[in-house]
Image (spheres, rainbow, N blue to C red):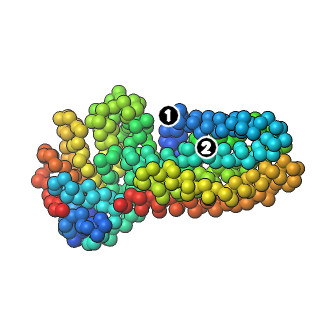
């Protein structure tokens, strides 16, 4: 008999969730299409004024990516609660927080990473100068996992409530404010040719904090959700 | 019998669970030794599922004491020793029985003396190993979940209505699994309305009252 080692359990968790994401890949295309359509709407609404679009490009792409992430967020634990997988996860000998961390990672890889990948395309549609693209990508690479982690805590807290999608948005969007400020600050600074490392470093610091704390909070919240 | 094995696997003293200050079931006393099977009996709503979820560690007892191998129940002490199979089977419908099993063993550990193919064969799912569960019948989904009983090492099985949705052969399969587990020194707690038809001796009966 072999006990499940921690690395094996982490790998199994990651593998299963990525496999599930692949089997449901139709769902994964939604946030990407949503982001593309929203960004396309801006020039129609504001007119093809190059200077104006360039000025708002960074902010529009960031906010669009955040909103698109919100679409996929409330599904993070929903099916696991419904089919009893979460119970089995809680009963497993592995630390729940670590397993949930793996779930969040898989969710980020499946839903947020495609958005980061198409971000340069979205930015290009709004004529963001190519010099600002590295700052945008780095800011998104730090901001999207941050939102996945914050979102996971809120999803865990609202687990089991009906119509949690709207509640989730209302709770998460205020928490996004600092993330948007620092990410947009980095892009704006890069656009002006100024050093943009400081706001990105703030995002990095916040991400490290959340990587440690968010899975623990998630685990506590989901245990409470089951214990009722 | 040595001193170590004479300590009951699971022991409950005046165990009860309250939901919003209302007791779900009357206080319970029972002991379950290794190699024993206990039937949890009671009407609908008498708290059978609640009791099993409580013993698995998903709920916290409101009153009374619960001992695991003679020591107060603790999550870490019995993690990996208890296998809980509830109404929700904990299986992903997009994955096949084999993928679900491989994931479960990655999480809970596995026995080395049996292969996944042999397990699928035993539960009657040979040839359905890679078919997504979504396309299988309710009974076949149940069989896919029962396959975990064969593959995962656990001293205590907590089975909530293991006979639900199963045909005659499925019921015989559950009985065979129970008899084998008990003969190998494992313990089982089964909740069921129906006749069990278990041939490994007279089971202990735990009667639930709301």
Alpha carbon distance from label 1 to label 2: 20 Å
Q: Position of residue B161 (x, y in %)?
A: 23, 47
Which residue position holds label 1? A23
Q: As rendered, which of A155 and B144 lies closer to the eye?
A: A155
What residue appears at the point 43 percent right and 35 percent down from the top-left corner? Answer: B94
Q: Position of residue A200 (x, y in %)?
A: 75, 55
Whether the residues at callouts 1 and 2 have beta carbons within 8 Å, the answer is no
Q: Secondary structure at mark 1?
A: helix
A104 sits to left or right of A225: right
Q: As rendered, which of A98 and A126 lies closer to the eye?
A: A126
What residue appears at the point 81 percent right and 51 percent down from the top-left corner? Answer: A188
Dot 1: chain letter: A
Counting other residues with Cα less than 10 Å from the Cα at mark 2, is it few (<14), some (14-19), or many (20 or more)?
many
Q: Is residue A51 visible?
A: yes
- Mark 1 or mark 2, which has the lower sequence index? 1
Q: Position of residue B127 (x, y in %)?
A: 35, 27
What residue appears at the point 45 percent right and 58 percent down from the top-left corner? Answer: A222
Q: Is residue B11 visible?
A: no
Which residue position holds label 2? A68
Counting other residues with Cα less than 10 Å from the Cα at mark 1, is it few (<14), some (14-19), or many (20 or more)?
few
Q: Residue furthest top?
A: B127
Quadrant holding the C terminus of chain B: bottom left
């Amino acid at each position: 008999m072999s006990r499940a080692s921690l690395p094996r359990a982490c790998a199994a968790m990651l593998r299963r969730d990525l496999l599930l994401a692949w089997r449901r890949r139709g769902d994964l295309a939604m946030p990407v299409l949503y982001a593309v359509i929203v960004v396309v709407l801006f020039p129609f609404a504001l007119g093809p004024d190059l200077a104006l679009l360039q000025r708002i490009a960074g902010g529009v792409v960031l906010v669009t990516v955040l909103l698109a992430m919100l679409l996929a967020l409330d599904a993070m634990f929903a099916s696991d609660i419904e089919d009893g997988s979460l119970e089995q996860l809680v009963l497993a000998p592995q630390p729940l927080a670590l397993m949930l961390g793996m779930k969040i990672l898989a969710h980020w890889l499946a839903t947020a990473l495609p958005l980061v990948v198409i971000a340069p395309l979205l930015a290009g549609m709004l004529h963001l100068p190519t010099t600002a693209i590295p700052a945008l990508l780095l800011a998104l690479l730090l901001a999207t996992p941050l939102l996945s982690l914050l979102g996971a805590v809120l999803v865990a807290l609202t687990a089991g409530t009906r119509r949690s999608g709207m509640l989730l948005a209302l709770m998460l969007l205020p928490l996004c404010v600092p993330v948007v400020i620092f990410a947009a600050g980095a892009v704006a600074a890069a656009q002006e040719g100024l050093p943009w490392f400081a706001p990105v470093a703030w995002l990095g610091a916040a991400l490290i904090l959340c990587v440690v704390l968010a899975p623990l909070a998630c685990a506590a919240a989901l245990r409470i959700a089951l214990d009722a | 019998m040595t001193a170590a094995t004479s300590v009951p696997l699971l022991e409950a003293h005046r165990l009860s669970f309250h939901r919003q200050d209302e007791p779900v079931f009357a206080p319970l006393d029972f002991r379950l030794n290794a190699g024993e099977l206990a039937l949890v009996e009671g009407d609908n709503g008498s708290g059978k599922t609640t009791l099993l979820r409580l013993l698995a560690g998903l709920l916290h007892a409101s009153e009374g004491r619960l001992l695991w191998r003679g020591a107060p129940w603790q999550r870490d002490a019995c993690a990996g020793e208890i296998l809980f199979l509830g109404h929700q089977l904990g299986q992903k419908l997009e994955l096949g029985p084999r993928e679900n099993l491989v994931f479960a063993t990655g999480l809970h550990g596995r026995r080395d003396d049996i292969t996944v193919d042999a397990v699928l064969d035993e539960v009657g799912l040979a040839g359905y190993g890679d078919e997504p569960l979504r396309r299988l019948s309710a009974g076949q989904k149940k069989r896919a979940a029962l396959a975990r009983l064969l593959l995962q090492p656990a001293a205590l099985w907590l089975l909530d209505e293991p006979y639900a949705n199963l045909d005659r052969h499925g019921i015989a399969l559950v009985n065979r699994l129970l008899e084998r587990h008990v003969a190998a020194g494992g313990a089982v707690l089964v909740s069921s309305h129906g006749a069990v038809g278990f041939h490994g001796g007279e089971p202990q009966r735990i009667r639930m009252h709301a």
